[in-house]
Image (tube, helix red, strand yellow):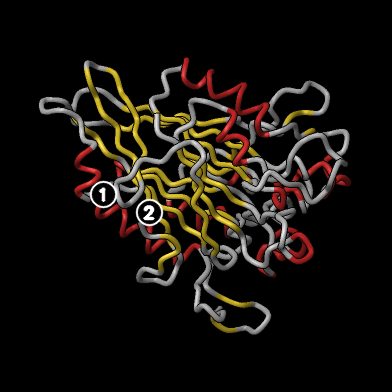
């Protein structure tokens, strides 16, 4: 198993395997680690990377252990690859705007969509573009002077305003879906709506609801159809979940406009619906930590770092891409990490 490795390009990566078995026109999913061992529902693998640099890759493996779990002779197998990023925080390039030079840290991590694009193209070249999905777990349009400039100085909301550089870059790379992060709301809902309009992929938030109607304010999920050589397509659902803490952290921007219920409740509502719609695989992209703790105590009835609870309590989920700092994790000075945590929470089915 490779966790937090540093492949060519310098961006940390994490590899996972997703295999789809077709037997008698039914698909059965099995998630395996890089060493071929199946995950159980309580297994969580975590790694940290510099802000904007985290990339989690779910890809096929050819290890002997994985081969041992292959279907019987005569059945058909289709493998596809899921790539995930999180906490991009306005980083298009590997550039430090404070020092006005290339970004570097003690671990010599790199950041930014330009670096990520190189890795994505490498994976697509190896696996085939039609056999891959690329998703994000939020916190995209805040965090650098570049993102501030296009929110406040030359705002994308202005008449004939510019296209946000993050939208341009993510469109060019070819993202398939992205969950909302709490920092998406820092510059107000109009900026977020304009960014959403400029993206050629959906921004997902099943637990971001209109405060008056309690209906989803953003698309809750997206459905993706992958064509197989076996005469039956694979339907992959991506469910997006954001952080309930938005109600506190961006109260001035969202009060009376949006409400943010718990991740577990909304996942329990939507996952069965996605399965009934024919989803063969359900992936959750959640802007939440996995510790089960909250930095805001009892100010809200919903857990901040709830991705682990979602994995434990909601059946029918195949994998969870976890983004966001674990704000309330014990042992972290000030309740905050300096680098965004990135975790896959997987279970075998």
* Residue at figure coordinates x 77%, y 53% from the top left: 187
Q: Position of residue 331 (x, y in %)?
A: 71, 62
Q: Decide if residue 141 is on the left or right side of residue 211.
A: left
How far is the residue under mark 2 from the one under mark 1? 9 Å
Question: What secondary structure is marked by label 1?
Answer: loop
Q: Is residue 20 above or below residue 307?
A: above
Residue 97 image position (x, y, % from top left) = 65, 77
Q: Answer left or right for 146 relative to 201.
A: right
> Badge 2: how crowded within 10 Å, few (<14), some, or many (20+)?
many
Judge by depth and name the residue closer to the eye, 179 or 65. 65
Give residue 198's mark. Answer: none
Vertical side of 138 occupied by 78: above or below:
above
Residues 132 and 273: in front is 273
Residue 176, image x, y percentages: 46, 42
Image coordinates of residue 264 in percent, x first then y, are 65, 31
Circle 1 residue:
61
Residue that appears at 77% across and 36% down:
302
Q: Quadrant of the C terminus?
A: top left
User: Count the marks: how many?
Assistant: 2
Q: Residues within 10 Å of mark 1 (few under 14, many from 20)?
A: many
Residue position for label 2: 15
Query: Who comes first in sequence, dot 2 or dot 1?
Result: 2
């Amino acid at each position: 198993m490779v966790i937090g490795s540093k492949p060519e390009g310098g961006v940390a990566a994490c590899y996972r395997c997703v295999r789809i078995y077709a037997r008698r026109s039914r698909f059965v999913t099995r998630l395996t680690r890089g060493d071929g061992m199946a995950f159980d529902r309580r297994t969580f693998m975590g790694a940290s990377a510099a802000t904007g640099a985290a990339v989690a890759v779910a890809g096929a493996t050819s290890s002997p252990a994985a081969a041992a779990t292959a279907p019987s002779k005569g059945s058909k197998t289709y493998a596809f690859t899921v790539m995930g990023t999180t906490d991009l925080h306005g980083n298009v390039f590997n550039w430090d705007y404070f020092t006005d030079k290339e970004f570097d840290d003690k671990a010599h991590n790199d950041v930014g969509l330009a670096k990520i694009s190189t890795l994505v193209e490498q994976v697509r070249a190896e696996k085939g573009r039609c056999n891959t999905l690329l998703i994000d777990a939020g916190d995209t349009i805040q965090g650098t002077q570049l993102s501030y400039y296009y929110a406040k100085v030359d705002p994308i909301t202005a008449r004939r305003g510019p296209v946000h550089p993050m939208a341009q870059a993510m469109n060019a790379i070819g993202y398939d879906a992205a969950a909302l992060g709490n920092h998406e709301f820092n510059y107000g809902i109009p900026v977020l709506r304009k960014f959403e309009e400029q993206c050629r992929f959906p921004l997902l938030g099943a637990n971001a609801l209109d405060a008056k109607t309690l209906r989803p304010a953003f698309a809750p999920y997206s459905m993706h159809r992958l064509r197989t050589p076996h005469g039956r397509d694979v339907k992959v659902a991506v469910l997006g979940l954001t952080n309930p803490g938005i109600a506190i952290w961006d109260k001035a921007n969202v009060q009376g406009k949006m409400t943010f219920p718990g991740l577990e409740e909304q996942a329990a509502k939507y996952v069965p619906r996605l399965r009934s719609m024919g989803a063969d695989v359900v992936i959750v992209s959640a802007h939440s930590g996995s510790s089960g703790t909250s930095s805001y105590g009892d100010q809200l009835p919903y857990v901040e770092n709830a991705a682990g609870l979602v994995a434990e309590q909601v059946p029918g989920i195949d994998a969870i891409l976890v983004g966001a700092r674990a704000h309330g994790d014990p042992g972290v000075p000030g309740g905050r990490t300096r680098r965004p945590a990135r975790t896959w929470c997987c279970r075998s089915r």
